[in-house]
Amino acid sequence: MNQLSDEELIARCASGDRRGMDVLVSRYHGKLLEFAQRHLGNPDASADVAQTTLVKVFQSAAGFRGTSSFRTWLYTIALNMIRDDFRRRKCRGESLLSEIDDGNDDPPEYMTTEDSTENIALKKIESVAIWRAVDGLPEKRRSAVILKFRMGLTYDEIASVMGVPDGTVKSWVHYALKKLRKSLEREDSL
């Protein structure tokens, strides 16, 4: 069962196969928790978002059309759940900016270690100071950076998740990295 693709597993879920659901949960629950934590900074809210996202995915399994990858569909649902949480917190007057340092400087297990420009950027982004700077980015740029460097999505996948052209995502990531680089330079000069 573990060797099946995400798309095959969600099709099994749609037909009522609980084992497919279990495999998808084991593949994505931790990643969804991390994704939500990077946005929300609150472990309880992050756990709620991850759980609610998975519930929504399984309730909607029959509606998965396969026009995008399962991963893109999953993160689209998760990002919408995060946005809903932001709106609820804003209505209650809670701070939207929060501490995002989880104390773990190890790269996620699903990231590659080859020396590419993106992986060099990933190594820098892993530092606590950078994640604090990421937390201060405008929502769309912050989401694009998190999806790219923490969740490992491609620009095309991020564009699908966020509902914008991939050129827009590339621009958001470019300007976010530029701002983060300036923040790093300021910290280094202190």
Image (cartoon, grey):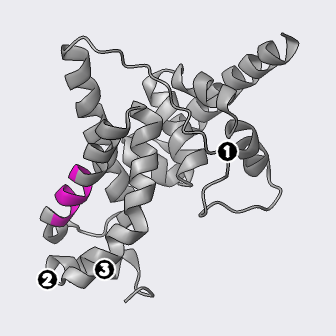
According to the picture, the residue beneath numbered tag 3 turns out to be 9
Q: Residue at x 80, y 62 (%)?
A: 114
Mark 1 and mark 2 residues within 8 Å of each other at the beta carbon: no
Label 1 vs label 2, nearer the camera: 1
Magenta segment range?
52-58
According to the picture, the residue beneath numbered tag 2 turns out to be 15
Indicate whether 27 appears above or below 81.
Answer: below
Mark found first going from the N terminus, 1 or 3: 3
Q: State the image coordinates of residue 179 (x, y, percent, origin top left).
A: 67, 20
Q: State the image coordinates of residue 50 (x, y, percent, origin top left).
A: 31, 50
- Name the kind of residue labelled 3 in the image: Leu
Is residue 167 shown to the viewer in this render? no
Q: Which numbered dot is residue 105?
A: 1
Work out how far the residue at label 1 is from the one at label 3, CA to CA, in angstroms. 32 Å
Instruction: Say which quadrant the C terminus sits in.
Output: top right
Q: Which numbered dot is residue 52?
A: none
Q: State the image coordinates of residue 169 (x, y, percent, origin top left).
A: 53, 38
Secondary element at image label 2: loop
Mark found first going from the N terminus, 1 or 2: 2
Label 1 vs label 3, nearer the camera: 1
Q: Nearer the viewer, residue 154 or 74?
A: 74
| Mark 3 crowd level (few <14, some 14–19, many ≥20, 10 Å Cα) | many
- Name the kind of residue labelled 2 in the image: Ser
